[in-house]
Image: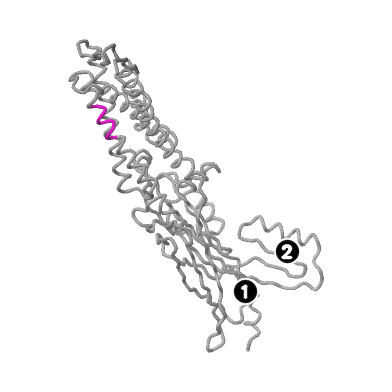
Amino acid sequence: MRTSPRSHNGLRPKVLRPSLNTRRSQVVVVLIELVLVTTTVLLARFGLEDFFHALNFPGRFTGAVLLVGALTTLVGATAVVDHWIRHCFPYSGLVALFCAFTALLANVMILISTRKNADSIFYMVVFGVLAVGSAAAVFAVWRTSVLVPTPKRVAAAVILPSVIAIANYGYQNLYQPYERETRPVITLSPGKAVRSKDGKAFVVPVDITIQNRGDRSFYVLGSEFHAMAQKVTLSDRDRLRQQWRADADQWTKPSEVNPLSRREIHQAGDLVDAQPWMPYGYWIESSDTFTTRLVVQLPSNTPYDQVTFYATANLARKDRLVLQPPLHFLTKTWGEKKYPEWVKKEQKSGFDSVIYRARVRENNSIDEYTRDARFVTVYWRFGTHGANVVTTIAREGEEGRQLSPEEEREVTTQYGLMELLAGPYVRNLWDIKTAR
């Protein structure tokens, strides 16, 4: 970049403009135009998608920045033509230089983003080539006679958009993934047991409430409520240390975590009731509350001494993904063969699953175009010793691939996945069994 000093009479000297007299100059102009026009098309495509359809304000702001970048590179393509051919505007070289630098900044930022998240080799190559081409365009324009009237103002005009773009990129890719999560709260409240008229059975009503006190909305990918019944006998004397160790050995099984007790002898619990308590694909908006009541029925002469209630919900933030279409039934693990290997192993150990699936749309246009399609798969699992819900988000055909802890954290952060738990809530049954 060169400034043009004033002559002795106070006027600026005539600026020597580049021309297309040589084949080399013609090739340079064609390549610069190709880089700037291609960058304009891609920035406009991504920007329009984000500006009108992004799921959150930072995404809409990113779309606006991309649209401004597209307009800038389009102006740059016009300025290059004037700088080399028409020579109508004295500062067209400066405009071309600024716009080429803007294209370089935009292409480098998107290249970094695609290298981090994208699956498409095509887009990584395209933006890699555009980044190199933009750098070459900046150098080519800089080498010509560029008139800079006020260098400090020009520097400020270059630095300000750069700072805005870098700050927005940092917010989207550094701060936002690690911001403090807002989590809804589940409360589980069993009511008073009610006996049937003939006295042969009783029911325990259970109220489940989910409250979203934050400013985010959530998809409910899956929910489950289950009740486990246990026999609990009393020992005549204090139990020995070895018996405590035997109880603690059961903690290695996720479905068997019983307290250590000096006199109580806890036996393995049996599943007596399991069901979803919210519709699949339902969502809970900000500051919203959802309440439902379920009942668990048992015979009055039940051999169990306690019943324990649990409720869980698997959620995903609505500002991180879109479910399209809504969750629908896919298959089941009995009588079917198309499901992951780990599900087959669990079926052999006594757990069956009902499987649901939906297509996931990304929350920004760059990820949507540069990543392979993802699917959320929900496994509603149940067996004689418990029930739960497992969710995965993966490319088609990779649902059964075991993720590393780093990959699992990345998926959880990117899509805002979380699991809410309520329970265990233990209800003693002695008052029911002894009532006449």
129 shown above or below 357 = above
Please report the bounds of the magenta region as a residue range: 70-77
Q: Nearer the viewer, residue 130 or 99?
A: 99
Identity of the residue drawn at 67% across and 57% down: 251
User: Which class describes the residues within 10 Å of circle 2: few (<14), some (14-19), or many (20+)?
Assistant: some
Q: Nearer the viewer, residue 135 or 419?
A: 135
Q: Which residue is mark 2?
A: 260
Q: Which residue is mark 1?
A: 427
**Residue 302's spot in the image, x, y percent?**
61, 78
Asked if the stretch drawn in magenta spans residue 71, the answer is yes
Q: How many numbered marks appear?
A: 2
**Residue 99's spot in the image, x, y percent?**
30, 28
The answer to which of marks 1 and 2 sits earlier in the sequence is 2
Q: Which mark is residue 151?
A: none
Residue 335 seen in the figure: no
User: Which class describes the residues within 10 Å of circle 1: few (<14), some (14-19), or many (20+)?
Assistant: some
Identity of the residue drawn at 33% across and 29% down: 103
Amino acid on which disc 1 is placed: Arg
